[in-house]
Amino acid sequence: MKTTSTVYWSNLVWDGKKMHIAASSKGLCCIIWPKKPFEDLENWVRKHFPKASLVHDPERLAPYARQLEEYFEGQRRAFDIPLDLRGTEFQRTVWQALQEIPYGTTKSYSDIAKAINRPKAVRAVGGAIGANPVPIVVPCHRVIGKDGSLTGFAGGLDIKRQLLKIEGTLSN
């Protein structure tokens, strides 16, 4: 018997900007940044869930959206939603390390490389961070340059700055 999985999606509005969020039956699997087209979500799902249908279901996504909204409003410091992270073993190891960075703190790329016992893999760590499918929940915005500078970020440095301000890491 052939089974086809389903990935459910909905929109979330943050700061007047629309984001797309998606979850499988196992948990949140993808967040698409504001200003990115819906096609980015479709392409991501096609790559990671090749036989899945993509179904709009705001009710199913409501618990995920609620926790993200609480975070944006400064009312949530940690997420307790299930995740369905799709990536290589190395990427998942990096994403696990990101989840261990406490709210309101930052680490450098080299700190993450050391944390996963791959101190020379700083560039690979950067690539894995850039491939993070559930930013914010897996807090890639908490990773900064070794010199304290805000560095490349898939959502754009303005969004990174906003997220760090929510957490009180940046004052201006």
Image (tube, rainbow, N blue to C red):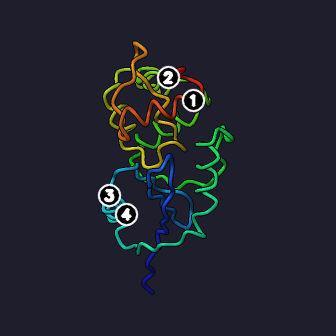
Residue position marked by numbered label 1 in the rendering: 101
Which residue appears at 45% of the width and 80% of the height?
Answer: 3
Left/right of residue 57 with respect to residue 63 in the rendered view = left
Q: Distance between the residues labelled 3 and 1?
A: 29 Å
Disc 3 residue type (three-letter): Pro
Residue occupying the far right of the picture: 75
Q: Which residue is drawn at 41% across and 75% down?
A: 53
The three-letter amino acid code for the residue at tag 2 is: Lys
Going from the N terminus, do you reach mark 2 or mark 4 first? 4
State the CA–CA distance, disc 3 to disc 2.
Answer: 30 Å
Q: Mark 3 points at which residue?
A: 37
Determine which residue is flagged by label 2: 107
Q: Image height check: is 85 above or below 76?
A: below
Q: Mark 4 points at which residue?
A: 45
- Earlier residue among tags 3 and 1: 3
In the rendered image, residue 48, in percent from the top left (x then y), is placed at 37, 60
Q: Earlier in the sequence, mark 1 or mark 4?
A: 4
